Image: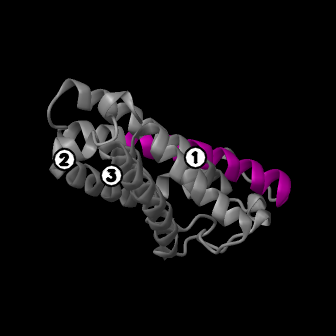
Amino acid sequence: MLVNKLKNQKLTLTALFAVLTGIGGWIKLPFFPVPFTFQTFFVLLSGLILGPTGGCFCQIIYLGLGLLGLPVFAYGGGPGYILQPTFGYLVGFPLGAFTIGVLTNRRINCLPKQSFLFLFSAGLIGVSIIAVLGVIYLYLNLKYIAGQPIAFSKALVSGFIIFLPGDLVKVILFASIGNRLPPFKTSYFYKNGKN
């Protein structure tokens, strides 16, 4: 009975974080070529609460829904979204959530409560993974698909550096919320070796 209850709660939270990631895409400031959105905050939080597998899976669900045509991405949805210059950031979401889940799961098993500083550091790693994949894809897309002559340094500035202040705010918010969650909430699905 308890196992079924935990499975149902995990499925509900997985669906909830897929939806929240989509809503985070609608909360945006329209910069070009990459908009500032709130998606990465929910990606980080999904990894913390659902763990590596659950966090990664909910982001894959989010990507699948968008590629099927639901308007959950910052600029809509559909299979053609793969050709958008910002698609690399979306590809980074499952890996970012997985990394956060791995880092925080290990920490959960070592200490009763995760420190703000640790969560902040983990959040920076997660955001960096998303940014690296995003900037590389942005550069390749603009140069070879859109046919725009662009230097990698320009893609780095317009796809990462300009967003550092906003990303830091999201990471601080993530670490603050994660730091306040009781240990049983963050280690919720790791009991009995389940993820």
Counting residues from the start of the chain, the first of labels 2 and 3 encountered is: 3
Three-letter residue code for mark 1: Gly
* Mark 2 element type: helix
Most common secondary structure along the magenta stretch: helix
Q: Is residue 140 magenta?
A: yes
Range drawn in magenta: 124-147
Check disc 2 and report the residue beneath it: 179
Task: Give the crowd class for mark 3: few <14, some 14-19, many >=20 residues within 10 Å.
Answer: many
* Mark 1 element type: helix
Check disc 3 and report the residue beneath it: 171
Residue 104 is marked as none
Q: Is residue 131 visible?
A: no
x 57%, y 46%: residue:
92
x 74%, y 64%: residue:
81
Q: Is residue 31 above or below residue 40?
A: below
Check disc 1 and report the residue beneath it: 92
Left or right of 110, for residue 8:
right
The residue at the far top in this view is 110
Q: Cβ–Cβ below 8 Å for labels 2 and 1?
A: no
Quadrant of residue 114 within the rendered picture = top left
Label 2, label 3: how far apart the Cα atoms are: 12 Å
Q: Cβ–Cβ below 8 Å for labels 3 and 1?
A: no
Q: How is the image coloured?
A: one colour
Position of residue 17 measured from the top left corner of the image (x, y, whole percent): 44, 60
Nearer the observer, 10 or 136: 10
Q: Is residue 95 above or below residue 62?
A: above
Nearer the observer, 69 or 171: 69
Left or right of 46, for residue 90:
right
Label 2, label 1: how far apart the Cα atoms are: 24 Å
Label 3, label 1: how far apart the Cα atoms are: 16 Å
Counting residues from the start of the chain, the first of labels 3 and 1 encountered is: 1
x 27%, y 39%: residue:
187
